[in-house]
């Protein structure tokens, strides 16, 4: 399978345009985004476009299939614990904060009316789509990149969220599984071969900061309103789409001890890394290379 430099550029351009479109619709950190307008709506119906409607429906689906472990209404909780702007601009430390001071409203406080192109959040509810929207963006970008080149195969990676489309190289796409999305491609870690679908890693070791000397991270437990305090520091899952993989990986972190029993019957291959570095392989995740 070969790709010309012109074809590669077409694929990159299609992927970049798809991601930019989704960012404009779904970013919590842009005042001009449709999501920010929706969060400011406080109980009123707000007109939104198809991209945000798709992202909202995907996030509501994620909440339903995980019994609320992955909940889009964690926006206010994230803001309270300090994740209130682009991560690169967050101060490393600051004043102490009241962890778990507010209950997460729950995905049932979000209404979507696709027929009329509108959505509504209950007063006090703030949506964050950072997890599911990024995975959805990877799936869409891969599909559009493949459409742009017309044949062959493509792989799109968006910070730990990977989607592939089309024809994979012989044996599959080699992907390094790392807890830190910034790890070099030739760094240490397991390499898995992916022929289709998606692969996603969720980790409590990235997007970390402190408040009052207390280490915090971006994965919120909807049951407490604070960062997850569980047995897993990272989870990597393979699934039919990047969205499904991302949702399952995040759910595994939040579910903690229940993660294996949730993943196994759904036949979602997963690698769980405990806080002490121990690994647990679930539902056919391959063993380490000899």
Image (spheres, rainbow, N blue to C red):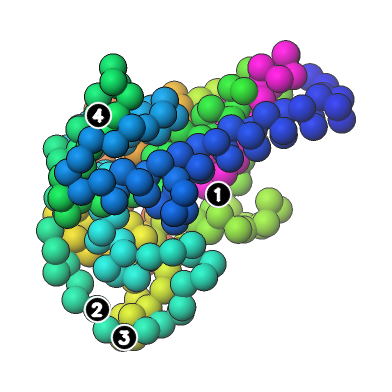
Name the residue: 58% across, 40% down.
Answer: 20
Viewer-nearest residue: 23 or 62: 23
Distance, label 2 to label 1, CA atoms, is 28 Å
Q: What residue is pinned by disc 4?
A: 112
**In the displayed structure image, the side of residue 282 where residue 175 appears, left or right:** right
Q: What residue is pinned by disc 2?
A: 97
Name the residue: 45% across, 45% down.
Answer: 33
Residue 86, position as x, y percentages in the image = 49, 62
Q: Are marks 2 and 3 in contact (CB under 8 Å)?
A: yes
Question: Which secondary structure lies at badge 4?
Answer: strand
Q: Earlier in the sequence, mark 1 or mark 4?
A: 4
Magenta stretch: includes residue 267: no
Residue 127, position as x, y percentages in the image = 29, 48
Q: What residue is pinned by disc 1?
A: 159
Front of the two marks 2 and 1? 2
Q: Which residues are magenta?
A: 145-164
Q: In which quarter of the view is residue 269 placed?
A: top left
Whether 208 is drawn above or below 255: the answer is below
Circle number at residue 95: 3
**In the displayed structure image, the side of residue 78 where residue 66 appears, left or right:** left
Viewer-nearest residue: 168 or 59: 59
Distance, label 1 to label 4, CA atoms, is 28 Å
Report whether residue 160 is seen: yes
Question: Which secondary structure lies at badge 2?
Answer: loop
């Amino acid at each position: 399978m070969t790709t010309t430099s012109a074809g590669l550029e077409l694929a990159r351009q299609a992927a970049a345009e798809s991601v930019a479109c989704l960012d404009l619709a779904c970013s919590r950190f842009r005042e001009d985004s449709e999501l920010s307008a929706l969060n400011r709506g406080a109980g009123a119906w707000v007109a939104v476009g198809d991209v945000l409607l798709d992202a909202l429906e995907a996030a509501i689906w994620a909440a339903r299939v995980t019994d609320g472990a992955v909940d889009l209404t964690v926006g206010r909780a994230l803001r309270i614990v300090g994740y209130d702007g682009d991560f690169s601009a967050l101060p490393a430390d600051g004043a102490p904060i009241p962890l778990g001071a507010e209950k997460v409203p729950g995905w049932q406080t979000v209404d979507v009316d696709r027929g009329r192109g509108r959505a509504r959040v209950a007063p006090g509810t703030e949506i964050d789509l950072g997890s599911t929207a990024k995975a959805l963006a990877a799936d869409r970008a891969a599909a559009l990149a493949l459409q742009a080149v017309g044949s062959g195969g493509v792989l799109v990676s968006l910070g730990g969220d990977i989607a592939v489309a089309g024809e994979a190289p012989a044996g599959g796409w080699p992907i390094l599984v790392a807890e830190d999305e910034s790890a070099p491609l030739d760094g240490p870690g397991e390499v898995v071969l992916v022929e289709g679908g998606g692969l996603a890693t969720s980790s409590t070791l990235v997007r970390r900061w402190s408040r009052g000397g207390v280490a915090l991270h971006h994965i919120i437990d909807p049951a407490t309103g604070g960062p997850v305090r569980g047995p897993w520091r990272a989870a990597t899952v393979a699934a039919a789409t990047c969205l499904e993989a991302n949702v399952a990986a995040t759910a595994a972190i939040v579910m903690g001890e229940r993660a294996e029993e949730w993943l196994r019957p759904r036949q979602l291959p997963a690698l769980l890394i405990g806080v002490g570095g121990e690994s647990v392989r679930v539902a056919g995740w391959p063993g380490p290379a000899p």
